[in-house]
């Protein structure tokens, strides 16, 4: 095999990409692969984001890999600890030697005649091409190059510092400064207590509230089990317990949202006291888990609010002023630093162009196959984790499915697998790729994502139990995933592949 050709190319060396590589080595031995990473380090999200207090908003017994126990007593881990865990995994399994850093994928082009993906990569000023039969896309779901920042009137008149958490400057000094954090999501509730330790004041300015719940950073159940059981047993039991708990809570938010809502408010009242204006600052307009629930480890946000080091203001922005932010109510918030924790820019397939047999692919016109493949796009699997549970639960399942598919193709002598609608699927109603989730960063871009249907395998259920069955046990040859061997392409119509069905 040529130096620039591989059986599999994995795009992304973050939590998903490193995990995919380990699964590939273990379950598909002998296959050549490389990992293309646009940055110069392992870790993805956990290396990119360096803002104060960055941490997981899921427990590490489910955000961690199925094959590698999480050993730290803290289950809600900070960014450096997670980054170290991913790097340790890569070292332990010899994955590091397969990574090509500073390789940004710009174009993916499939040829049915060759059963090959040509991957165009930008490295500095140099453009190169690599080839493979199969692509595992683990580049995440948001742009590393830009973040979502609304246009604020008067922005140019503001004399202080404006930063977005995605591009946090290493030398930012906020000690003794007045800080306003614009936003109310997971990033904002992390930043506020972390910055309040050194800043003169920190205000979390939100247009509308988010559901927030406290949880101990240390998991007493996991730590107790680890003291009496072998490490892997303790990890597996804790992982499954936490999965069941996550799924139970989510189901209750669908079937009895008012009960979960009342429980969250009861906990908030206990944290903030009888006089705090919970109705204004912590009562969302939507039901729990219509948007992601924000986790507060060890009540750190509530402690900052109770101490007076931080406060929450619920209002809309009229404009930036020279010295801060003027609100619609007329109040002005003085600020030396404004942090725009206003969200991410979601992208499809890491912003790369995708072509199949000379035709560009518009993913909004494709149907999602099990939430990981797309009609008309051969030999490509993408990793998109859960929005209502830990990302890695689905990343692990996706990698397992991909390895199962690769082994099936080798056993049957086929080189191409592509989803296609069956006759009985032609009249399916089209639904958003992610449903029942009202967060702005999702709703802004759902029109760009593939459609899902109303039946397997065209659904993206965001349900671990359903996915376990669909990925591990549902037949690969289901009439929707078509397997083919290599065949010549009609010279008169080079963009139309001629496929030979596998026997």
Image: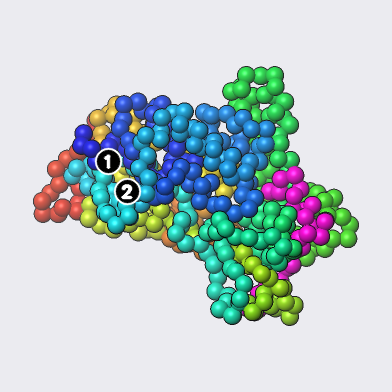
Q: Using a 10 Å C-alpha cutoff, classify the residue at mark 2 as few (fewer than 14 neighbours), some (14 to 19) or many (20 or more).
A: many
Asked if labels 1 and 2 touch by Cβ distance under 8 angstroms, the answer is: no
Residue at left 59%, top 23%?
A: 232
Q: Residue 308 magenta-drawn?
A: yes
Report which quarter residue 273 is drawn in. Answer: bottom right
In the image, is residue 471 part of the stretch drawn in magenta?
no
Q: Position of residue 173 (x, y in %)?
A: 63, 60
**Residue at the image position 46 percent from the left and 56 percent from the top:** 144
Q: Is residue 81 above or below residue 353?
A: above
**Residue stretch in magenta:** 295-319
Residue, x 81% and y 60% (percent of image)? 308
- Measure how far apart labels 2 and 1 are at the Cα level: 14 Å
Dot 2 or dot 1: first in sequence order is: 1
Q: Nearer the viewer, residue 37 or 58?
A: 37
- The disc placed on residue 377 is 2
Given residues 166 and 143, the one toward you in this image is 166
Is residue 313 visible in the rendered image? The answer is yes
Q: Position of residue 431 (x, y in %)?
A: 48, 56
**Residue 312 x %, y %:** 75, 63
Q: Is 178 placed left or right of 388 in the picture?
A: right
Q: Residue at x 68, y 29 (%)?
A: 222
Circle nearer the viewer, 2 or 1 = 1
Task: Answer yes or no: is residue 110 visible.
Answer: no
Which part of the image, by quadrant, shows the N terminus? top left
What residue is pinned by disc 1? 132
């Amino acid at each position: 095999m040529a130096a620039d050709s591989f059986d599999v190319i994995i795009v992304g060396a973050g939590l998903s990409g490193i995990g995919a590589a380990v699964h590939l080595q273990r379950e598909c031995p002998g296959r050549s692969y490389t990992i293309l990473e646009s940055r110069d380090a392992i870790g993805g999200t956990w290396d990119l984001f360096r803002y104060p207090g960055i941490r997981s908003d899921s427990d590490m017994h489910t955000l961690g890999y199925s094959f590698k126990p999480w050993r730290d007593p803290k289950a809600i881990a900070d960014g450096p600890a997670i980054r170290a865990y991913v790097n340790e995994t890569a070292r332990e399994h010899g994955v590091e030697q397969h990574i090509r850093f500073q390789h940004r994928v710009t174009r993916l082009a499939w040829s049915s005649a060759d059963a090959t993906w040509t991957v165009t990569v930008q490295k500095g000023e140099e453009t190169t091409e690599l080839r493979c039969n199969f692509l595992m896309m683990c580049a995440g779901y948001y742009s590393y190059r830009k973040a979502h920042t609304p246009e604020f009137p008067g922005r140019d008149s503001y004399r202080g510092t404006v930063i977005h958490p995605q591009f946090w400057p290493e030398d930012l000094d906020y000690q003794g400064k007045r800080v306003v954090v614009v936003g109310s999501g997971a990033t904002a509730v992390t930043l506020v207590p972390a910055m309040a330790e050194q800043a003169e004041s920190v205000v979390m300015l939100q247009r509308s509230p988010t559901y927030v719940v406290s949880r101990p950073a240390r998991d007493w159940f996991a730590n107790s089990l680890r003291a009496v059981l072998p490490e892997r047993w303790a990890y597996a039991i804790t992982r499954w317990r936490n999965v069941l708990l996550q799924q139970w809570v989510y189901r209750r938010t669908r079937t009895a949202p008012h009960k979960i809502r009342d429980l969250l408010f009861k906990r908030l009242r206990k944290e903030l006291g009888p006089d705090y204006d919970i109705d204004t600052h912590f009562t969302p307009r939507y039901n729990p888990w219509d948007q992601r629930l924000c986790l507060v480890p060890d009540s750190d946000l509530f402690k900052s609010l109770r101490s007076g080091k931080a406060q929450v203001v619920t209002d809309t922005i009229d404009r930036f002023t020279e010295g801060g932010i003027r609100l619609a109510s007329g109040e002005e918030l003085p600020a030396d630093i404004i942090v725009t924790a206003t969200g991410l820019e979601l992208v499809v397939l890491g912003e790369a162009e995708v072509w199949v047999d000379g035709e560009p692919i518009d993913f909004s016109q494709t149907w999602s196959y099990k939430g990981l493949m797309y009609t008309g796009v051969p030999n490509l699997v993408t990793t998109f984790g859960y929005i209502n549970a830990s990302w890695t639960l689905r990343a692990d399942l996706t990698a397992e499915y991909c390895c199962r598919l690769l082994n099936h193709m080798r056993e049957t002598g086929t080189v191409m697998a592509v989803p296609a609608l069956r006759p009985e699927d032609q009249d399916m109603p089209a639904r958003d790729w992610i449903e029942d989730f009202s967060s702005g960063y999702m709703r802004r871009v759902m029109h760009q994502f593939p459609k899902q249907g109303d039946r397997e395998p065209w659904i993206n259920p965001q349900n671990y139990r359903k996915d376990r069955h669909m990925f591990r046990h549902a037949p690969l040859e289901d009439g929707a995933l078509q397997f083919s061997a290599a065949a010549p392409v009609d010279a008169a119509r080079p963009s139309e592949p001629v496929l030979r069905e596998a026997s």
